[in-house]
Image (spheres, grey):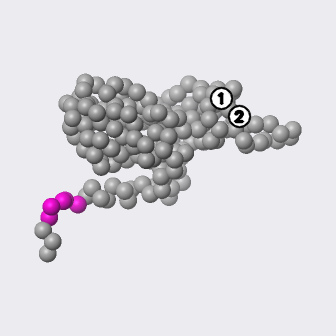
Amino acid sequence: MFLDNSLSFNGAWNTPTAAITATVDGTSIIDITGAGSGNAPAMINGFPATNTAIGEDYGAGDGVYIPYAVFIVNTTGTGSGTVTFSVSAAPDNGSYGQGTYYTLFQSDAYVGTNLVAGTVLLYPLPPIPEGLGTAKALPRFYKCTYTVSGTVGAVKFLSGLATNPTNIGLQNRYNNNFVAV
């Protein structure tokens, strides 16, 4: 799996979140144009040259390259509370900023002590909900939210979007401390 820093919810794939102790958004918002919220994208459409507020449905995929939300536990949780992951998307608001976010998916709640360092959680990113693509502009901004209930300790994550990351999970399928024959 290739991890692109421009698709990280933490600013970079080698930078974990701060300790997640309360409900919080990821530290970075993914702007598919790369311009950043409030900035006109570099894409030009038509004549005379004008910037275009574009969007893309990352969750559409083409059956071969399926986008995933990837959450990697960087520091083990210690509490009995829970963490839920969600990814939301928003179109350009017409002024190159973030419009209203809508939730694409939300995970089950994970108990803090079950979030062990090295655990990789993969969620296929669903397409835009039915009818939303025609009712609203396609999303330009993507963000993640960590929803905490109770105490989960100082758990930290690496998170972002990637295509076809299924190979990264294979390392967790083998037991450790086994006898080699």
Residue 123 vs residue 152: left or right? right
**Nearer to us in this view, 139 or 156:** 156
Q: Could you classify mark 1 by the number of other residues whose Cα lies within 10 Å: few (under 14), some (14-19), or many (20 or more)?
A: few
Location of residue 154 in the rendering, given as x and y in whole percent from the top left corner = 28, 33
174 left or right of 65 in image: left
- Tag 2 secondary structure: loop
Local SS, label 1: loop
Q: Main secondary structure of the magenta part?
A: loop
Query: Which image quarter: residue 26?
Result: top left
Tell whether position 156 is magenta.
Answer: no
Identified at 25% across, 37% down, the residue is: 77
Quadrant, the C terminus:
bottom left
Determine the residue located farthest toward the right in the rendered image: 48
- Alpha-carbon span between mark 1 and mark 2: 7 Å
Return the x and y of residue 103 as percentages of the image width and height: 46, 31
Tally of numbered tags: 2
Q: Which residue: 15% across, 61% down? A: 177
State which quarter of the image contains the N terminus. bottom left
The residue singled out by tag 1 in the image is 38
Please name the amino acid that badge 1 sits on.
Answer: Gly
Question: Mark 2 = which residue?
Answer: 40
Q: Residue at x 56, y 25 (%)?
A: 100
Against 53, residue 173 (above or below) is below
The answer to the question of whether label 1 and label 2 lie on touching residues, with beta carbons closer than 8 A, is: no
Type of amino acid under label 2: Ala
Q: Is residue 104 visible?
A: no
Could one spot residue 175 in this view of the protein?
A: yes
For the record, the magenta segment spans 174-178
Q: In the image, what residue occupies the spot 50% across and 40% down?
A: 11
Where is residue 126? Give x, y as percent: 46, 42
Say few, some or many: other residues with alpha carbon within 10 Å of mark 2 (under 14 / 14 to 19 / 20 or more). some
